[in-house]
Amino acid sequence: MSRRPRILLLADRPGWAYDRAARALADVLQDACEPVVRYVVDRPDLAREPFDLLHVFFWGETSHEAAVADPRRVVKEISSHRWLEPPYGPLDPLGVATTWLRRAATWTCTSRRLHALFRAYGACHWTPNGFDPTAFHARGRRRDGPLRIGWAGNAGDPVKGLDEVLRPAAAGRVELVVADGSLAPDDMGAWYRDLDVLCVASRHEGEPLTLIEAMACGCVPLATDVGIVPELVEPGRDGLVVGRSAEAFAAAFAEVLAAPEGVRAAGRRNAERLARTRTWDHVAPHWQRAWQAALALAEGDPTTRVAVPEPRDAVTGEAAAMHERNLGVAVGQWPERSRIAAELLGALPVERGGGVVDLGCGRQPLRDLLPPDTPYDPVDRLRRGDDTLVLDLAP
């Protein structure tokens, strides 16, 4: 393709999180492609609009499907776990893939956690979100006196845990400062810079963006183990990972209040680290590579069948039982067992260039815990991805 590919970015509405991401990507990647932002609320006529690729920011969006028949031209983004609850679920990743993602040949995930869940089912790419360093930064930050603790998000969303967890934890102990969505996006940077600690008490999250923005402004997070928290927070150094209960957050409040200088020093380190690693300039190459792969697929032989997950009712008998045991989101022991396995591998005297063969790889949680240059060969009874060696070792 000699000209710049025209990529249509379909966000939900102006000013919201998807729109901010779309506009940031359009700005950073405008030399590599011709990005155009459109909004679902405006009901754009996609059948009359020329584009090479359509990036749909919400995996549950279907308004475009009547106008775009070829799944090769569609990318769907998975940036939330809303499939765990009504009105979309409860579903597991296989159910999401077969219900909501079948009409998109390429998927992107904004957290490594989501990527690990979905990459066994299709052409899936890790595309982390970034932040605008002109809006979210620690310049001019001057904090002293008692620590200031806050929370930002949709106050009416029970998944977020504001009323269920944080307000009971703070009652009679600390003042919890809340940004409930009434502040304009342009004012959020100043709001974060007036905090020392940001709380995340969600039941599940794709990211959240508030974590990235607050840490970029010099905050220390107290967060449940959701979304990108393991990617950004080393407990005890960058912040605290907290159990999802009022009692656990009350204990975390007491811990940070006892060490205000240490908290502020950690906040300064967080701002410096994110400015070096997580701006849109830093993460945009991941998006560019995902779109390039999708464009290559879209420009290929139109008669080639696109691999899509089988519907749930097509997976039967013993294979269905294997899916339920090994791929369900409720199998909580596997990440911990993979962490232990990675630590054991790190302690072994492996020669330079040595690799790992993962027998019974499942969703391959071990893969993300290994050093990035480690050769990794996934082996399983069922196909978990394009590089899986399918091998049944059962007698």
Image: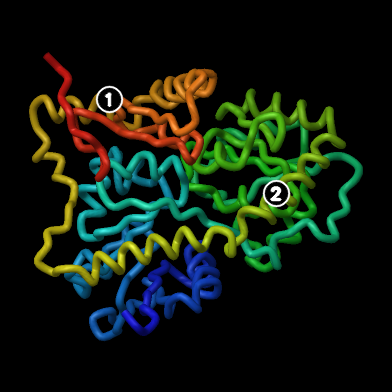
Determine which residue is flagged by label 1. 360
- Left or right position of 23 against 77: right
Q: Residue at x 25, y 85 (%)?
A: 48
Task: Relative to 136, say whether 41 is above or below.
Answer: below
User: Which quadrant holds residue 341?
Assistant: top left
The label shown at residue 273 is 2
- In the image, 319 versus 297, the foreground residue is 297
Q: Between marks 1 and 2, how big is the CA–CA gap?
A: 36 Å
Determine the secondary structure under disc 2: helix
Q: Which mark is residue 262?
A: none
The C terminus sits in image quarter: top left
Which residue is found at the position 38% from the left and 46% from the top? 82
Total residue callouts: 2
Please provide percent x and percent y for residue 177: 72, 47
Q: Residues within 10 Å of mark 2 (few under 14, many from 20)?
A: some
Farthest residue in the top direction?
A: 395
| Residue 298 rendering spot, x and y as whole percentages | 24, 69
User: Is residue 369 positioned above or below 37 on the image?
Assistant: above
Question: Eyeballing the image, is 25 above or below 258?
Answer: below
Task: Residue 119: give x, y in percent of width and height.
Answer: 32, 44
Identity of the residue drawn at 71% across and 45% down: 150
Name the residue rendered at 15%, 40% in the picture: 312
Q: SS of the residue at dot 1?
A: loop
- Placement of 128 over or under 34, stated as above or below: above
**Lower position in the chain sequence, tag 1 or tag 2:** 2
Is residue 36 among the parts visible in the rendering? no
Q: Is residue 86 left or right of residue 259?
A: left
Q: Amino acid at mark 2?
A: Arg
Nearer to the camera, 206 or 191:
206
